[in-house]
Image: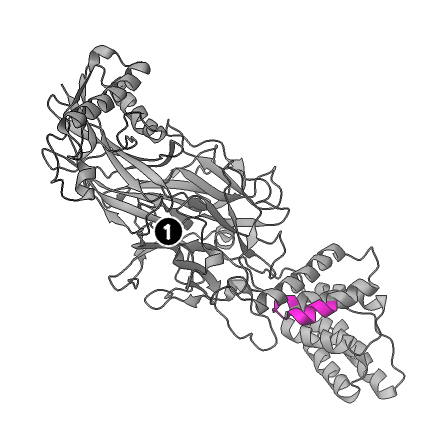
Amino acid sequence: MRRISVLGAVRLGMMCLLWLASSETAWSQLAPKVQTPTNTKARSLLEKAQQQTKDRDFIKAIETLNQLNEKFPSFGEAFLLKGSLLKAIGDNRGALAAYRDGLSKVPLEAIHSSEYQLLGDLALSYGEYQTALEAYKQLMKVAPKTQRNLAKSQRQLLTCEFALDAMKHPVGEAPVAMPSPLNSFKFQYFPALTADNRFLLFTGRPAASSGEDLYVSRQNKDGTFGEPVPISPAINSSYNEGAGSISGDGKTLVFASCDRPRAIGNCDLYISRRTGNNWSTPVNLGTNVNSTEWDSQPSLSADGRTLYFTSTRRGGQGQEDIYVTTLQPDGNWSAAQNLGTPVNTTGKDMAPFIHASGTTLYYVTDGLVGMGGLDVFRCEKTPAGTWSEPRNLGYPLNTFENEASLFVTSDNQKGFCSRSRATEEPPGGYRLARERPVELFSFSVPPPVKARETSTYTQGRVFDANTKKPLKAEVKLYDLDTDVLTQFVTSDPEYGDYTVVLNEGHHYAMYAAADKYLLKSLSFDYSSQHAFNPTALDIYLEPVRSGRSVVLNNLFFDTNKYDLKPQSRTELNRLIEFLRQYRDVQIEVSGYTDNVGTPETNIQLSQRRAQSVVEYLSGHGISVTRLRSKGYGEGHPLAANDSEAHRQMNRRIELHIL
């Protein structure tokens, strides 16, 4: 029998409405003060309804009040009394109508301030913003300053004003439920995709009584998604596995699980890594990440080395806050840090999603003015590493209901979210949110919702250049303008495959390195290109052996100049690291040109460029006895000098092992 954690099912899934109070207690808190009518028939019906209420026969009391409403429609207090009974039994839709009718028939007085507040709250819960707005405005006119939840009602008034304006200016189209074979479960939520959009990960519960498991659906060639399957028996267990996040290359998985043995809190975050087709046994992320409270809703950066998540631990700004942790060089995760303001608020701040670009964060909160409940907001990382003021995504991505989470693909084209399916309320009762099916939705991302930077990816396999066997290699991506490491992934030891995410508008250097192999240098310049498409690139690594050579693709010179440009420092620093790792290696730095100009000039230019590299290396601690420079001019071309692209290939610096 599968164990189901109530806390896990509720906190990891959709926000659920729990009706905990008894009908009698709820009615006693809602019942209005009713003046006795002068009409004998009206007074008789009122007394009958009051007695039925005392006898706990609320349904009969409501039937009697219906008669009173029909015969004496101007007696507003009777409508208010009926509204309190309907609210007590959970018929919120009926209560809304009764309060609206009743308050339209009674004087605007402080005695009815609680009913105005209830009417506003009920109308807002159904997205009837104009009704809610008018109710809150009336409340502000008559409510005493000591009125309970008055500050909340003032905030709700701002919500109504924001929502009415937002609905006049919709942002994009409403999300659409994803077609079969998806949405075949009772509940499915927290969608996440790999950088190439090939795999869709989500949390699923086939039935209301089922526990949470992680499922994967593979994208077909026509862009549709296939039958979802459990991710792995190594992951799914008798415990709840929910709210998962996967790295851009699909090799690192972090998910939340509740009530596991030796857990730190009631819900903890766990990590698993994929080698070949197999996932490792999940490991608790430890006390640097998890707390003794609830930790869930993870979101991994594209390279799987930065993790955002939600926690209820003490010391935050609200009930739930968003935290971040990073993977350290020693393999441990740093102590989780609260993101602070302006991201976190005094409300609920949940379900973070960091875009593949790493520059835009999406999350849901009820601590900022929005459409009501939990809305999705976005904020951008500044050059200083802080976050900009969150901005509401607007209507129809946000509605009067609680939004759960949002995912935007790396190319900024498609978005995914989960929503409660609209259902009719049963007669005489309100359908609890936790009973409503939850489905996966998709939408085209409108410009205001897109991440600040669009991403693409390069993927391929790493091989031994001689044996052609797959290699486990470190693949690192640096921004050449800042010399900052932006991605760090490892190719699969069984298949050699890797995926690296690149952002539009940047010039990158990528390096593949494995033990006892030459450093492979690659260049991606997206700083001014219009084409920004995924690339397939297999990498062949040469062994560190005499006679082997490699092109250094990220050394830059001005035309006919031999001074190294500042962007070259990334390549030079990686070369220094390589020479420090292999201290017995001696190298020749070889310079080459195209055939433009005289042979003599080209020989001289190539020699001076090679010498500039040697001087940089020796100036940073590499013994000059290990270094040699030589210029070959236009000799040994890699391609015919018949086009600019080919000439660019021939203008190069190579590293030769002596």
- Quarter of the view holding residue 121: bottom right
Out of 95 and 422, give the one closest to the viewer.
422
- Estimate the x, y position of residue 422 in percent, counting from the top left: 50, 71
What secondary structure is marked by label 1? Answer: loop
Asked whether residue 1 is in view, the answer is no
- Quarter of the view holding residue 148: bottom right
What is the crowding at mark 1: few (fewer than 14 residues within 10 Å), some, or many (at least 20)? many
Q: Residue extending furthest front?
A: 598
- Estimate the x, y position of residue 295 in percent, counting from the top left: 50, 43
Q: Is residue 341 left or right of residue 182?
A: right
Q: From this view, report whether residue 1 is shown above or below residue 599.
A: below
Q: Is residue 219 magenta?
A: no
Q: Which portion, as a residue range, is magenta?
A: 124-135
Asked whether residue 592 is in view, the answer is yes
Dominant secondary-structure state across the stretch colored magenta: helix
Out of 565 and 322, give the one closest to the viewer.
565
Say what amino acid the circle numbered 1 marks.
Ser
Residue drawn at x 42%, y 48% as measured from the top left: 453
Q: Report which residue position mark 1 lands on.
A: 410
Name the quadrant of the C terminus: top left
Q: Is residue 524 left or right of residue 382?
A: left
- Estimate the x, y position of residue 496 in percent, counting from the top left: 20, 40
Q: Is residue 132 magenta?
A: yes
Q: From this view, report whether residue 150 is shown above or below residue 580.
A: below
